Amino acid sequence: MVTDVGHAQRVITRTRDSETSGGVLTEIGLVTWRSLVKLTRTPVLLFFSLFMPLIWLVMFSQTFGTVFSSATSGGLPGGGSPTPLPYDYVAVLLPGITVMTAIQSASQSGFAMVSDLESGFMDKFFVAPIRRSSVLAGKLLADGLRMAAQAGIILGIAALLTLAGWRIPFATGVFGAVLIMFLAAAFGVAFSGLSNTVALRTKNTESTMMVSFSLTFPLLFLSTAMLPKALLPSWVQSFSTVNPVSYMADAARALILTGYDWTALGNAIIAIAAFGIILNGLAVMAFRAQGK
Amino acid sequence: MSEAVTPRPDSKKKAVPARSSKGSLIDVRHLVKVYAGGGQEEVKAVNDVSFSVSEGEFFGFLGPNGAGKTTVIRIITTLLPKTSGSIRVAGMDVERDGAQIRRIIGYTGQSIGVDGELTGRENLWLIGRLYHMPKSLVKERVEELLEVLQLKDAADRRAYTYSGGMRRRLDLGAGLVHHPRILFLDEPTTGLDPQTRNAVWEYLRRLHREEKMTIFLTTQYMEEADQLCQRIAIIDQGKIVAEGSPTELKAAIGADIITVRITRDEAFEKSRDRALEIARMVPGVSRATIFDEGVSAHTADGGATLLEVLRRLDTEKVPVHQVALAHPTLDEVFLQHTGRQMRVEEVKPMSRGFGRRRR
Ligand SMILES: Nc1ncnc2c1ncn2[C@@H]1O[C@H](COP(=O)(O)OP(=O)(O)OP(=O)(O)O)[C@@H](O)[C@H]1O
Ligand SMILES: [Mg+2]
């Protein structure tokens, strides 16, 4: 530890003069890079965040599949066509699983925040001459990329399943699939505001987990994510109309089953934007209040 | 909570002149911090603290657990808002010009904030880039720091595999990547073995000497403050109780100090009071005070006075557990100003046992 510091002297001036290079995008990019590197270096996390959704897909399509097909053998109740459906339950479920995955990733979003606050790493960000908002934005961008990748993998596997004879229409093809990935990521990012708010306010992993967990499942099952609206009990139907998860699921489902449903897409985007602004607004406030 | 800050008359505050210091790099005036406590009681962690640090100075904050060191350092480094008072760093106001201040300071916190999933090299690189240094310069600087901090061999290992000492060093490096003008260190050697601590000390001295860096350090170790700092403020329970160079502080106490520890039995308090009376009556004792384990007495001629004190204690049958004679160290300075020992739980090297006295 007693080597040449003199050399340092020579670069000091240069270092201090160069403080203005790189803008806000560099800042966000660095935070995103760090989050993604951490993710890829935690193989267990990576494995579960990518393969859990597939397990859900198989599990739910097996358990609910027969119920669904007997309930819809004469077409959807209230639906126009009396003929049997031209697709399997898995096609109905697929968009729901992408939403579910995004929500689950979103509910874990706050964990990293808690651990950075606890370890003192967050201070490194706060004491650096960067905008606080870059830290949050970079993290959300990393989360969004992860959620899009998850949705992409689920859709890719589903595409392979069609080769095995599963009937999934993919009505809007590759472009629709990309749109679903984008929607899932946006939806997930919107929802991670909740987990981040709780994390920043409580600074406690257990509380973050409990709050996220106790909201995630009701939101999923009291929505049209698992079953089309027509098959839900009437009180669940009424709840599902105020549940943003339904709008997201309906839009994605239309892209798989029938085609571009602009009303559904518009509703989904409005729902995502509204919840995203509210929840992430709360997260930003909690983030600003750090250390106060 | 906003409380009117008036300089409170306090006998111990005489060492803190509220001089206005134009040329100082860090200038803290009447700083108060009250933690809201979230439903619990409010905590007044910093209670009217004023001090200043001039350019190129090595300044230390010395105080026990909970004294308020971290609170002060976090407020100056813009990590925590103050309750009241004024703080200027390089002439800039912490609240208004936080962004500019952050460019010229480096901070290494008390908890080691390195990212365990990143390698040592990546940790430093990330910090350098966050300071908007160009890539080529960051690369050069990171290699240099890895070399200096002796982390070259472990540079490509993830930081969670590092030992505590390696992590401390890496964290120190993270505060230095951008060549700060002022370096803030919150207990930088806590948990290090003596060898590593010495190496860190040596490095800090070099930074101070060769890079002309202004360093603000907090510590619980008297020895550390004594070894490194040109000027020290002793902080206790949110107040600065003494300030000056180590030499000044020690000189203020007087020549020798006799420490008598009383046996801990049911009559401990009574025995201690008795010992205090006795010590005060011994000729040559300039001042005697009690502390949590016994009595300490200041005297010009330690050897002769000690014998007399012991003789009288023995006659009065005061149960003496241990006796020590020492030249003043910062431990005594602390004891003197707070009436408590710095770290009671530690076996203190303060008492070079009677009989092994070096003089
Ligand atoms: N976030 C907080 N909320 C409430 N009280 C706090 C908070 N942080 C610190 N305190 C209190 O403020 C006082 C000063 O704490 P601080 O961390 O500044 O002490 P310190 O001198 O750094 O101690 P140590 O040597 O243990 O690090 C303590 O009484 C502590 O309990
Ligand atoms: Mg502290």
Image: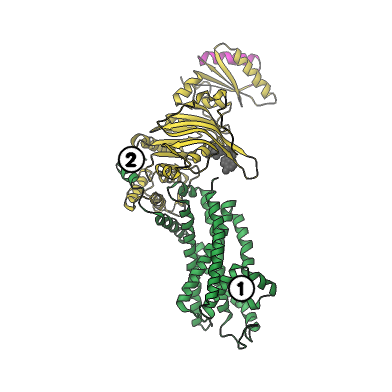
Chain colours: A green, B yellow
Q: Which mark is residue A3?
A: 2
Pair 2/1: label in front: 1
- Could you tell me which residue is drawn at 49 percent across and 30 percent down? B233
Are discs 2 and 1 both within one chain? Answer: yes
Q: Is residue B311 magenta?
A: yes
The one nearer the camera, A124 or A184, is A184
Residue B11 falls inside the magenta stretch? no
Which label's residue is closer to the chain start, 2 or 1? 2
Q: Which mark is residue A224?
A: 1
Of helix, strand and loop, which one carries label 1?
loop
Q: Secondary structure at mark 2?
A: loop
Is residue B196 something one can see in this rendering? no
- What amino acid type is highlighted by mark number 2? Thr
Question: Mark 1 vs ligand 1: CB under 8 Å?
Answer: no
Query: What kind of residue is marked 1?
Result: Thr
Q: Residue at x 59, y 35 (%)?
A: B3
Residue lying at the far top of the rendered structure? B283
> From which residue to which does the magenta span run?
B300-319
